[in-house]
Amino acid sequence: MKLLPKSGVAGFIKELSKTREVVAPVSDGESYAVFKSVAPGETPIIDGSRFILSPRSWFMPGYEVLFETKDGEIVDKTPETKAYATIGLYLADAHALEVFDRVFLDGDKPDPYYNARRADNAIFALVPAKKRWSVFWGMTGNVCDWKKACDVVMYDLGSEFVMEPMTDRGAELTKSLADADDSKKAAADALLARYDEGEVDVKAIGERLMWDNPKWEEVSRKCVACGVCTYGCPSCSCFDMRDDLKCGGAERYRCLDSCQHADFTLMGSGYNPRPGRMPRTRQRLLHKFKYQPEQFGMIGCVGCGRCVELCPVGIDIRKIVGGKETK
């Protein structure tokens, strides 16, 4: 393990930026931070002091042109594949990228738009010094296993970060840092243990969230179908594709969508298999805790807690997963 004093973070990022485009959470000027390419002089927020929106907004932008037509010619808009370093996303967010990889990279036709930002991206994932009130990483998986999704794990010990390289690339990018002593390593292990809650029984969660459970109606009555839970989620991958006319041509773009919206499953015939809030609420939870484990072998939720904090009516997914609202 290596040691990075917080006073040296700016210098470390400056060094990283010589070979990679650095992406990190930066203040939006209000109360939260968003992931973006770090401009010279900008100070990333990687100490957990602000609410950080999901890095999904960078890996899968809310609006992205796929191609356009101009003067009768098709112009490909696939982004250039570059070397990136994403620093300051949570360890849970790094695991969420593994969920994204199953959706967008598995199979013989990987998504080139997502892959352009993912292929050569060194992931520096943070374990914050203070666990936010909404976080429940340990309820959704083995937190220690998530370290494999990272190039470097950063443990916030207050005045410094302990940096644990997990790959050869991570070791190369941190080789200039001083070695951490045994006491720092022990402190890092103790910090991660605060987020771990032992073995997760995926099958039991799936069995508890049964299709015909009468409590789905009770849970969904609180929901206002705003979709903020899905837009804030680091592992929700729903999108829509649309065509728009432009002066002299047209464009096809991809934009975020949400399974919580009434028109998400609306078909061209006018039929909608999930017209009400109850089946949409049920779909979101079953997709993450039952269908994705069956498809990918991993829970789709990573316990980041963003949906808990963002929900305007106080729906708490932890109570649902824990059985308090679905017994």
Image: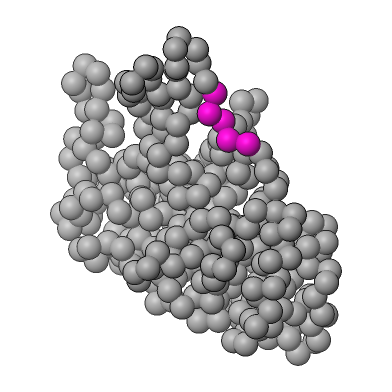
Q: Is any part of residue 278 visible from this angle?
A: yes
In the displayed structure, 189 sits above or below 110; it is below
Q: Name the residue at 23% across, 50% down.
A: 226
> Quick check: is 298 in the magenta stretch?
no
Q: Describe residue 113's horizontal placement relative to residue 155 as left or right.
A: left
Q: Position of residue 131 (x, y in %)?
A: 48, 78
Give left or right: position of 61 versus 176: left
Quarter occupied by residue 52: bottom left
Q: Which residue is depicted at the point 20% across and 63% down?
A: 313
State the residue at coordinates (21%, 49%): 225
Where in the figure is residue 198, as x and y percent of width and height? Answer: 58, 71
Residue 162 visible? The answer is: no
Q: Which part of the image, by quadrant, shows the C terminus?
A: bottom left
Q: Which residues are magenta?
A: 76-80
Q: Name above or below for residue 270 compared with residue 303.
A: above
Quarter of the image where the N terminus is located: bottom right
